[in-house]
Image (tube, helix red, strand yellow):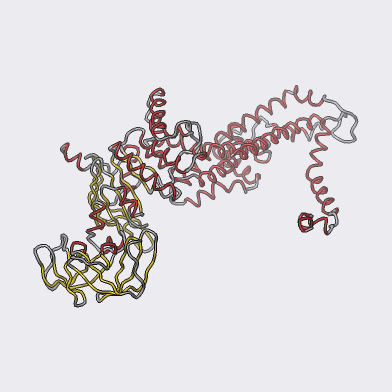
Amino acid sequence: MRSGVIDKPLASARPQPKPRLLAAWTVGVYAFLYLPILVLIAMSFNDSKILALPFKGWTGAWYRLALNDQALRNSLLNSLQVAAAATGLATLLGLLAAFAIYRYAFFGKNTFRIAVTLPILLPGVVTGVAMLAYFSDLGFDLSLGTVILGHLVFGLPVAMGPILARLGQFPQALEEAAYDLGALPRQVFFGVVFPYIRSAVFSGALLAFTLSFDEVVVTIFLTGRENTLPMEIWARLRTDITPEIAAASTFVLLVSTAFVLLNQWVSARE
Amino acid sequence: MSEDLQHERLVYLEAVSKIYPSAQGNVYAVRDLNLDVRSGEFYSLLGSSGSGKTTTLRLIGGFEIPETGRVFISGEEVTWQPPYRRNVHTVFQNYALFPHLSVAQNVAYPLSVAGVARAEIAQRVGESLAMFRLDGLGERRPNQLSGGQQQRVALARALIDRPKVLLLDEPLSALDAQIREQVRQELRELQRRTQLTFIYVTHDQEEALALSDRIAVMNQGRVEQIGSPQEIYDRPTSQFVAQFIGKANFLAGTVQEVGKEFAVVDVRGVSLQADPGNSTLATGAAMTLMIRPERFQMGKYSTAQNQIAGKIESKTYVGQLVEYQVSTPLGTLKVAQLSGRGDYAIQAPIQLAWNASDCQVIPPPAQP
């Protein structure tokens, strides 16, 4: 039968060998990437006094300990403050920079754009050392404030990127129509342009927050007496290595994952 | 300015030029343009792309500032005023409806930015939606509407705060051909009913002829001719206009004799009677005659002043009309006749006749 021949899937007509080697390789790669994280999560539940395997039984004790640990709680609070402040500033400045690039032709525009974007590529060590030298020349005391400024350096391009991309798609006619219908520049921005780029602003902010929340390298150079959560975890690794750190790290992982998923969700809604 | 004059000249452009710098030097998008649009008029700017018609509209809307010249709306100079200070609204080519707002919010936009009270907005939007046959669609988003509905939303939005002038930038070009004619009719009725001044940009001569009180034919940043559709069609003042609007035969000749009503013109040894229109003719001067293809009478006995024998060379049936190419001592002429009014075979000898008033003298191009 003619239709029977056509309907028959190709694969069954000529059976192919299953790509076992490829499957094994893929599993290997993912294991390499994610096994350490899984081990860390496992250790945070391990009923053992040291941060090591073997697994000796389930316990939530390390989480209770971490939650009641005043130093960890303070550092978490610091991290949230730093991330919130750096994100707020980065998003605001990123919005302004994106607008300047999108709207105006000015001398050195390309240089400006590159200069704003470059810190994403700069190693954290370079940013950290440079800013440390700069702040000490200016006579700034190191504090969470300087950490916020440090995070702002890479947060700004991260926040600006999606906004600029979205602005590039904005139909100019919408803006002209709004002006034409009597809207003042402020009304055009808040009523027409901003709703169009809102999801990009949000997405850039989420990304900047995530990066700031678990940043270590720049923070090492710029923090004073107060520690952020990743710094606290790192500092403790040298003194008391207990599964409490694994619990705190798992918490950081949870926050970051939540933000990445939120970002995905926001972008998908567009 | 007196009330009367204000009424006469609602929109007035005085020696306006708009220049765009380009690699080849400065390009005039609009050059020394003078335009006056009267209150309540349906005024069309007709031209091909690059003729400056859209730039002219943008100069009136406030999206462009002219390098020289001045723009007036209701007697007030607005040359430097931003769009939101001008009492004119635009219907854009692709309507530019706000995608994040509902239909009702789109229509309400001019009122909400002006700070009109909510209750009044709701009432006026309701009336407007009803007037533009958009009832029940107020909660939809623009992308859930058909092209015709989107166009009505754009019109409703532009008219809700009763501007003095409505600018329309090829508003029918985004519509399907089937509904275009119907929407065209609705536009004309809307303008009649509201007594508003419409300035309408189009490249479609048929649209301009069907809709306008007056048409400005534009070419390369200048106005070629301003007049009623009939004036433009019957008495084009340049060869460009005659060619751009409709079809035409052009005959080069010399003036033999200037009479009281008609002039006698020699074309290839044939004497023709022609209507000089507004041009002053001198005996012996070279000039061009224009005859529209449908103005010829074919075959039957005629008392028309001009007559000539010819032979049918080719024939194209286009439904409503049959278009012939007829070879005559004057050259090959385009002749159009209503279909079903006698059939002429190719190679058939034929007698062509036409009135002196249908034989229009085209003035030579003005010396710049």
User: B346 and A104: which one is in front?
Assistant: B346
* Location of the N terminus of chain A (image quadrant): bottom right
Residue A181 in sight from this viewpoint: yes
Q: Position of residue B97 (x, y in %)?
A: 45, 40
Left or right: A231 in relation to B250: right
- Mark yes or no: residue B368 visible: no
Q: Could you tell whether B137 is left or right of B354 in the image?
A: right
Above or below for B205 versus B306: above
Closest to the observer, B150 or A78: B150
Q: Is residue B323 above or below residue A253?
A: below
Q: Is residue B52 above or below residue B288?
A: above
Q: Residue at x 51, y 46 (%)?
A: A169
Q: In the picture, which quadrant includes the C terminus of chain A?
A: top right
Query: Residue farthest to the left?
Result: B260
Determine whether, in the image, residue A160 is placed left or right of residue A230: left
Rendered residue at 27%/37% (across/down): B195
Among the 4 quarters of the image, the one containing residue A221: top right
Q: Nearer the viewer, residue A54 or B195?
A: B195
Could you say where residue B337 lies in the image, as x and y percent from the top left?
Answer: 31, 63
Q: Position of residue B27 (x, y in %)?
A: 33, 59
* Residue B135 position within the rendered picture, expressed as x and y whole percent measured from the top left: 45, 31
Q: How many marks?
A: 0
What's the residue at 70%, 36% (across, down)?
Answer: A257
- Quadrant of the image occupied by residue B327: bottom left
